[in-house]
Amino acid sequence: MKIKKVITLKIKKKQSPKFFYFLLLILIILSVFFYFYREKHLEYLKKKASVARLESEINNLKKTNAELKNQIERLNKPVGAEEIARDRLGMTKPGELSFVIIPSPEETPAPEAAKQPAANDKKENWFSNLIKKIKGIWGND
């Protein structure tokens, strides 16, 4: 007996359009989901950066607040009030002498008001010279 080999070929059938539409629907749903997720994620990152910035600002303000409290405590003591009175107000205790050191003229810059009259004199000289020339041309001496 001879055994015949039977070759069977499986022929793939065309996929039904339902499967294609199902995949398309899943793709659309995933796209919409990731679009909104991306928007929320970006918003989350912005809020996180804002929180970090505000926490840094709070820490700086806490440091400043502590420094100011220390300064208030120091100034409420007699030594702190005396320091302000001596340094800023120039006050002295009875029997003390106060010396004020005046810088030399070379170290002190000239005030702007002192420089302006010289410039005004030059302008007047220029103007008066012009008037004299005009009078000289017309012969009205």
Image (tube, helix red, strand yellow):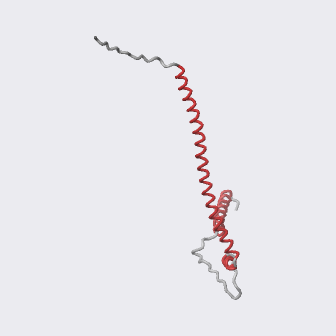
Q: Is the residue 57 above or below the residue 37 in the image?
A: below
Q: Nearer the viewer, residue 5 or 29?
A: 5
In percent of the image, x 54 and y 21: which residue is there? 18
Q: Nearer the viewer, residue 34 or 63?
A: 34
Residue 85 placement, left or right of 27: right
- Quadrant of the drawing holding the N terminus: top left
Q: How many marks?
A: 0
Q: Quadrant of residue 88?
A: bottom right
- Quadrant of the drawing holding the C terminus: bottom right
- Residue lying farthest top? 1
Q: Residue 26, image x and y in percent?
A: 55, 29
Q: Is the residue 102 above or below the residue 132 in the image?
A: below
- Residue lying farthest left? 1
In percent of the image, x 47 and y 17: which residue is there? 14
Q: Residue 107, image x and y in percent?
A: 57, 74
Q: Residue 97, image x and y in percent?
A: 67, 86
- Residue lying farthest front? 1
Q: Residue 61, image x and y in percent?
A: 64, 61
In percent of the image, x 59 and y 39: which residue is there? 39
Q: Nearer the viewer, residue 115 or 83?
A: 83
Q: Quadrant of residue 43?
A: top right
